Image (cartoon, rainbow, N blue to C red):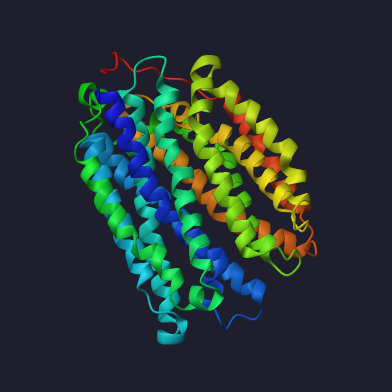
Amino acid sequence: MNRATRAAGAAFIGTTIEWYDFYVYATAAALIFDDLFFPNASSPAVALMASFATYAVGFFARPLGGIVFGHFGDRVGRKSALVVTLLMMGAATFAVGVLPTYASIGALAPALLVLLRFIQGLAVGGEWGGAVLMAVEHAPEGRKTFYGGFAQLGNPAGALLATGAFSLITLFGDDALMSWGWRVPFIVSAVLVLIGLLIRLRVEESPVFERTEKSAMPIKAVFRTSWRSVLLGIGTLPVAIGGYYILTTFLLAYATGSSVGESEQLILNGLSFAAFVELVATLGIAYLGDKFGSRKVAIWFLVATAVLAVPQFAVLGSHSTFLIFGMLGLMRLATSGTYGPMAAILSEMFPPQVRYTGISLAYQGAGAIFGGLSPLVATALVAGAGGAAWPAVALLVGMCALSVVCLAVAPRHRDPVPTAV
């Protein structure tokens, strides 16, 4: 196994574990954290919004994680930063799994939940950029989108594991889920982290990093020379990040709410199927990115996402397994086409000496704005519209338009030396 393949495999395993931890929290926030940690809210809608607010804290912490670990990733090495982020994420997720609820310790419970979510956000903020660069910077020329796709595979794989874990737990019934079952997906994260750590420690440092002159202060260099790239990078990602959470976290809460009335089991199974579709499709889409151009492919799938927005929400409430599974699968195929090529697209937007910091700021900034706020904003807009889904549809279509514009004008940078394989 050559260095490129080994780095791509490690990127996949590491990001799978990190995103599993992140999405386990997202699923629990949509389903049960409102009852467990905010039982005294004035209404179920307020409790759900409070639950999503704790979920959003992780996204607001992500830019800080990108700055901190981006600095060390650009100065000390991609590999060292990635080991620390994996350990941080595993510890925080395990701690959520053993955290007492509001019924046991009162207001201290949601306060601790927010703190642990903040630590999760710091870890993910540093993880994604390093994993992407380890895959892309080891890749041969002409294959960077494909190899970068392995880091992107961690997202659907982690989502599949997270929703699959909760799907299994719901088989024991609501009482089991609310009493002990919700803790299991968090606690088993400790085993996954140990496996990921063993794999990550065996990967060589990025050859591009080893041959690049280091910046004394990457964050200053980014804002001095590449601030436009940071802003455009954020603008390319609203659908790849925020659209994803509208179509998973928000959709799960909306579809299983009283106004629509779909069963939790049906939607969780449908989201697991959608995650499987993305897992299968991502590398194929990344291959198309190398063949036709990563930006062109992303724009194709942004248009498809906008077209599918209305039928996606229209089938909710039909109680039809075929229609719901079919639309969730089609929509995830479309959104995976906006996410899979992003590893290569964002990497080429920054020069190597500030690349970890630059792509982390862009990605995690977009996460804070679009990922953290999208479920909360969609919930508020839909509640204001009397439960109608059209505001969520309009929000998603607007995100698609912004992404297309920013992709069309974003800059490109090439590595100054050939990439070793």
Is 266 displayed left or right of 221 in the figure? right
The structure residue drawn at horizontal position 26% and vertical position 49%, both measured from the top left corner, is 195
In the displayed structure image, the side of residue 81 where residue 146 appears, left or right? right
Depth check: give the residue in front, 293 or 403.
Answer: 293
Q: Is residue 119 above or below residue 235?
A: below
Which is nearer the eye, 92 or 214?
92
Q: Please give the name of the residue rendered at 26% of the width and 43% of the height, measured from the top-left corner.
A: 81
Q: Is residue 255 above or below residue 339?
A: below
Residue 78 visible (yes or no): yes
Residue at (42, 52) in percent of width and height: 20
Residue depicted at 42% across the width and 78% down the height: 109
- Locate the C terminus and report the quarter of the image it occupies: top left
Q: Would residue 55 be visible to someone looking at this image?
A: no
Where on the picture, by quarter, is residue 353?
Answer: top left
From the viewer's perspective, is residue 333 above or below residue 98? above
Question: Please, is residue 50 above or below residue 69 in the view?
Answer: below
Name the side, left or right, on which 91 lies relative to 272.
left
Q: Nearer the viewer, residue 378 or 255?
A: 255
Where residue 285 appears, as percent x and y from the top left, is 53, 27
Q: Quadrant of residue 152?
A: top left
Quadrant of the frame with the N terminus: top left
Q: Position of residue 369 (x, y in %)?
A: 54, 49
Give the x, y percent position of residue 374. Answer: 61, 53
Considering depth in this image, is 102 or 166 the residue closer to the camera? Answer: 166
Q: Position of residue 12 (x, y in %)?
A: 37, 38
The mark total stands at 0
Quarter occupied by residue 53: bottom right
